[in-house]
Amino acid sequence: MKKYLQTRGYIRAVEEVRSLLLRLIKQLFGEIAEELLAKIQALSLEQLEA
């Protein structure tokens, strides 16, 4: 159960970081091309943070 909760926490953190990143990009540059959006959604947490 603990491992499950840790995994859920990791997934939630990735989703939150990705959401914040996408909001910032949209504020700075406007709408995001579908191709770029797909690439961002495929990034790991470490890649998003970098």
Image (cartoon, rainbow, N blue to C red):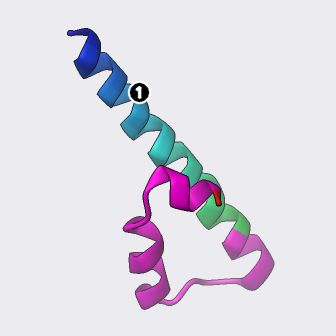
- Could you tell me which quadrant the C terminus lies in? bottom right
* Residue at 48% in and 71% down: 40
The quarter of the picture where residue 5 lies is top left
Nearest the eye: 4 or 30: 4
Q: Is residue 17 above or below residue 28?
A: above
Predominant secondary structure, magenta span: helix
* Residue at 35% in and 22% down: 6
* Residue at 46% in and 78% down: 37
- Could you tell me which quadrant the N terminus lies in? top left
Q: Is residue 45 above or below residue 1?
A: below
Q: Is residue 27 above or below residue 6?
A: below
Q: Position of residue 4 (x, y in %)?
A: 23, 20
Is 34 within the magenta?
yes
Q: Is residue 33 left or right of residue 6?
A: right
Q: Which residues are magenta?
A: 25-49
Q: Residue furthest top?
A: 1
At label 1, the amino acid type is Gly
Residue named by callout 1: 9
Label 1: how many residues lie within 10 Å, few (<14), some (14-19) or many (20+)? few
Element type at mark 1:
helix
Q: Is residue 28 left or right of residue 23?
A: right
Q: Is residue 16 above or below residue 23?
A: above
Q: Position of residue 17 (x, y in %)?
A: 58, 49
The quarter of the picture where residue 10 lies is top left
Q: Residue furthest right?
A: 28
- Count of picture labels: 1
